[in-house]
Image (cartoon, rainbow, N blue to C red):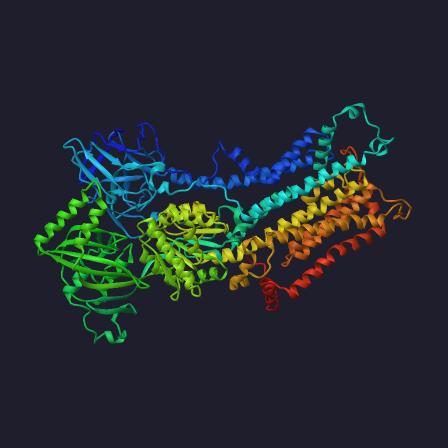
Amino acid sequence: WLQHVQCLKKCSGREMRAEALMITFDDNRINSDKKKIYLVKRISRSYTIWNFVPKNLFEQFRRIANFYFLIIFLVQLMIDTPTSPVTSGLPLIFVITVTAIKQGYEDWLRHNADNEVNGAPVFVVRSGSLVQTRSKNIRVGDIVRVAKDETFPADLVLLSSDRADGTCHITTASLDGETNLKVCVCTHLESLQAVVECQQPEADLYSTIHLSLCLFCVCSCVRPLGPENLLLRGARLKNTKEIFGVAVYTGMESKMALNYKCKSQKRSAVEKSMNTFLIIYLGILLFEAILSTILKYAWQAEDKWDEPFYNQKTEQERNSSPILKFISDFLAFLVLYNFIIPISLYVTVEMQKFLGSFFIGWDLDLYHEESDEKAQVNTSDLNEELGQVEYVFTDKTGTLTENEMQFRECSINGTKYREVNGKLVPEGMSDDSTDSSSPHLVSGVHFNHFLLLDTHTHTHTHTHCMLFYQLPSQTSIAVFFFFFFFYLKTFKYSSVDNLNKTLVELRIKSEVPFCSLRYKLLHVLEFDADRRRMSVILQTPSGNTMLLRSVFLVNGLRTLVVACRHFSPEEYIEVDRRLNSARTALQQREERLQEAFSYIEKDLQLLGATGVEDKLQDKVQETIEALRLAGIKVWVLTGDKHETAVSVSLSCGHFHRTMNILELLQQRSDNECAEQLGRLARRIKEDHVIQHGLVVDGASLSLALREHEKLFMEVCKNCSAVLCCRMAPLQKAKVVRLLKTSPEKPITLAIGDGANDVSMIQEAHVGIGIMGKEGRQAVRNSDYAIARFKFLAKLLLVHGHFYYIRIATLVQYFFYKNVCFITPQFLYQFFCLFSQQTLYDSVYLTLYNICFTSLPILVYSLFEQLVHPHVLQNKPGLYRDISKNALLSFRPFLYWTLLGFSHAFVFFFGSYILMGEDTTLMGNGQMFGNWTFGTLIFTVMVITVTLKLALETHFWTWMNHFVTWGSIAFYFIFSLFYGGIIWPFLHTQDMYFVFVQLLSSGSAWFAIIIIVITCLFPDVVKKVFYRHLQPTSTEKSQVTDELMGGSESGGRI
């Protein structure tokens, strides 16, 4: 239960040697002093050096084609088969190796990024002195020193600060997206021999934290610790030179780590479709093998075919088991037809994804000049998934906004003002009329009330008559009137939250003379989501006590309302007693604090209000509208406050002004949540004509997902836009998983810029990180990274569209050409008594997918464009044509499969009819033999499948021409050399002079031309018919693009 560590406390310039600090956990887990609890889990990497080989092999053999060819390879090793084991083994090894190298390289990059975080230097107290170590080596109970602008490496209890008042300022932007500074205070310690009693770690960032500090040296007293004493891992220290804190939650027990999600291997919808198609083709293969085996034994039932005079059986063959012979023949046919499953498909797909991913990084439209950041691809396996997105889950702060505020208007002492050309102007007056005729904005007394707060919660430096201020939160605004009075013209203000800046600028622009006053801060009533306010109790220079309260409202702007209340000495004594009693309570502390706050925050006098607008990123509204037109629903998931989130949703176009906003907020019980959901569902049905938007907070979401998941999903899906606020990082991931696993199985995309978005990014089908101001954790853990939200439109509507049509056609075409390839082999068995004789030479079997037909489809899959990129961006509705995996649905799959079988029948029977029986096709009277017949079919097949792809190509480049006509030419040249020379390293050369004899026959040339035209002409007629009578939106855009000359400038991605 107890853990003793040496520590050092530094307070008010004095150093104290610590004797012991003891930490108690109530989950009965004992942490040894020598045991290291690692802080940073390498969540962004998938492999380690020890599990790479087995884990990668497991992932790859989950692919049906890889597993299938492994079985075929083993069968070829065990029994005598018509083809060599090399024909299956070498392609399989090549595919596995190339894929492993690609995935290993991508994971190595993520591993290097993780090491930067894991190896970050930190200072801890060991044996009474500061020792530098790595962040992953921090242990529970260590005293950690954190300097200004550094990130807290663990969840720490604040022990001391270099500030005289024992406070420090932190920003939690990477945790909850809130960029304003928060104040944390240290507890007063008479001695460092103490026990910190902690509750069991929880993932919820907003749950109440219960800590107790028990002091033993001087007195056995217990002091409660609250959220203001805890420094969460991932937060950053501001305005404080250094602090010391004791680590209470480390490793996977810290709140930040508990909100992480283990990284899993993502698989695209296209890959899942490929596996489904492979299962279907595997069924076709098994059917053909079983049918051939059965027909073989049916044919051999006659003695003349079972053991002809020219092929007598050996004694061993006569005595062999019929069952074993049947199995052996079945496996032999399986190997003979195995090329119907294209293993080279995966090689081409991997190459297409890897090479195609470079286009994203090369796209200048995705380059952000101000930050010098270009788009980044961390995982190329999901390129085509960008074209299938149905739901976008986005963070707010730093993703939709710039974390900057723009002043819009204010109200002071009942008068409303607005900003015109950098000056405050009363409503209804122009800028010109303010120079001489405008009255003072407000009297000095009210203006001082509006501005003055605590004077010791700020920091300042004075250099060359220049003042720099950094202030904590919206209401903690400390103004030194003495400095304003003398240095008003040279004053420079720097604030994390521009709401603060608005109030100070208000004073500067008013040019009202004022005097220097100092107020003493007595109590801070922190902001919470229920009260939606924050208050401070101050003592004026004259000794009076007053309450200054700010309330956060929303009216399309971020609105801050300021009010005050004056206390008599007797009233303040009662207020102080209530607050201290509530804050030291070990049980029901939150309830007692709420009662005290309610007693204090009443009978207030209104002073004024300001309205500021959170500055959006450029073209956010246009991007969201384009996504909506493309059929993509946008959900905003943010940790920010309800009012702020709604304000930004309205300003960015996520919520329309005419939209009916529904709310599921502050639900306290399951019954209350169910009743509210029922009311919302009925309201949607009654008002089904108008659009609805839904606002949900984190607490209500937890209740909704507990027992009313189905009803909640029904309400959400009937809403045009959904906004979830006060969300913990893990809740964001749960919402994504909820949509992801719904019956419709929609493709989801998550985009964010902070560490609090990592779980959401990893959970979604596609995760995108924004290169923003909240660190690089989102970028490191994402699949893609962009500099601004506006780039998402082109990433999905253009790149996603291109990637999907390219790889969808690639997959369908590969199955088509392999059906064309192996079906004649199956038909040939009917003419050779199912003797397992091959129709093609073994070299042709090996090179068909590797050399003769591989490059045209690879180049097509890299450069194909159905329409110009500008057309896709200007017409987002074209994205709907490819949604829901349209090009890989059953209907296109059936079309390509039947097309392959029909072409194969034309190849085989067209050549068979030409040759007939005893037909002389050469000038010397000789007839074609078996290998000539097979070569004729193979020649027609190579030409037909290549020209079929040419018919599918809409965007021709010089590379398309080169590989299309070059592949056909290469086949002819290779066949002439292969069959025209006696190669000494070949044991047999059945193809010697076969190809030359074939080309010497005019009838063969005529057959090639006729068969190719017979195969392709119906396809051309079909395309023309459908394009004119039933054109798709994409085909209509193609016509428009051609009329406008857009195709001439195509090819630029």
Q: Residue at x 26, y 49 (%)?
A: 182
In this picture, is 200 found above or below 939? Answer: above
Query: Residue 345, how many percent across, how many down?
Result: 63, 44
Residues 937 and 978: in front is 937
**Residue 869 placement, left or right of 130:** right
Q: Quadrant of residue 432?
A: bottom left
- On the image, which quarter does residue 465 sit in? bottom left
| Residue at point 72%, 44% (across, down) | 822
Q: Position of residue 436 (x, y in %)?
A: 21, 75
Residue at image point 78% right, 40% down: 829
x, y (%) of residue 440? 18, 70
Is the N terminus in the top left, top right, bottom left or bottom right quadrant?
top left
Quadrant containing the C terminus is bottom right
In this view, the residue in front, 479 or 736, is: 736
User: Where 438 falls versus 507 (above or below)?
Assistant: below
Q: Residue furthest right?
A: 925
Residue 106 percent coordinates (x, y) = 50, 42
Asked whether residue 618 appears in the rendered view, the answer is no
